[in-house]
Amino acid sequence: MLPIQKVLCPTDFSQPSRDGLAAAAELALHFGSELLLVHALPVLPALPPDPNFVFNVPEYELALHADANERLRKLAEEMAAKGIKTRTFVGHGDAGSEIVRIAKEEAAGLVVIATHGATGWRHVVFGSVAEKVVRLAHCPVLTVRATSN
């Protein structure tokens, strides 16, 4: 397992994921690892059959993808300023599955993922991306608990 060549860190651009990124960056610096930043875009639902409903899904998906790329680029610049080699990836679909897929394809040695600390009905309704990654990843997973305010 050691030394870790690639550290994968998914982000949804929230504060908890920033905390996870800080831990991933520290590990990448310590081991001289490459940092892989990942954001997964959800699959958009099918359009209603109402012919009066106007919504250009491909255009919207392109805008979401462009926004994610730009936000990842900014994070990568922050990491480069710290001397961390970084690559970015935008996945499409279920976040947990996409994180696991990219980690496997890129031969990540470690996944560092933030937990949002959802409990109760939120956890039941929305599930846990971190939990899914822990169960399915081919490599070790470090979870970073969300700081409570």
Image (spheres, grey):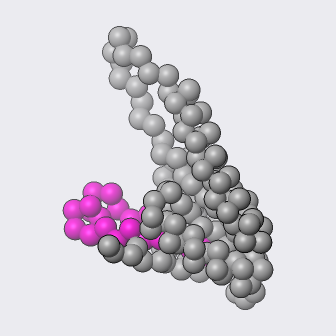
Residue positioned most to the top: 52
Query: Is residue 137 shown left or right of residue 132?
Result: right
Q: Position of residue 50 (x, y in %)?
A: 33, 15
The answer to whether residue 108 is magenta is yes
Residue furthest front in the image: 81
Q: Residue at x 49, y 22 (%)?
A: 56
Residue 44 in which image quadrant: top left
* Left or right of residue 43, residue 7 in this image: right
Report the front residue among 146 and 49: 146
Residue at 50%, 61% in the rendered image: 96
Residue 36, quarter of picture: bottom right
Q: How many discs mark residues in the rendered view?
A: 0
Position of residue 88 measured from the top left corner of the image (x, y, whole percent): 69, 56
Along the horizontal axis of the image, is 30 left or right of 116?
Answer: right
Work out whether residue 126 can be spotted. yes
Residue 15: say if magenta.
no
At horizontal 49% and vertical 65% (from top left) the residue drawn is: 17
Q: Residue at coordinates 64% horizontally, 46% vertically from top-left?
A: 69
Q: Which residues are magenta?
A: 107-129
Compared with residue 93, is residue 35 higher up or lower down, i.e. above or below? below
Instruction: Please state the horizontal and vertical placement of residue 64, each as a whole percent of the image.
Output: 54, 39
In this view, the residue in front, 7 or 94, is 7
Q: Quadrant of the C terminus?
A: bottom left
User: Which image quadrant for residue 53?
Assistant: top left
Q: Is residue 107 visible?
A: no
Name the residue at the bottom extreme: 2
Is residue 91 shown above or below 58? Answer: below
Q: Quadrant of the N terminus?
A: bottom right
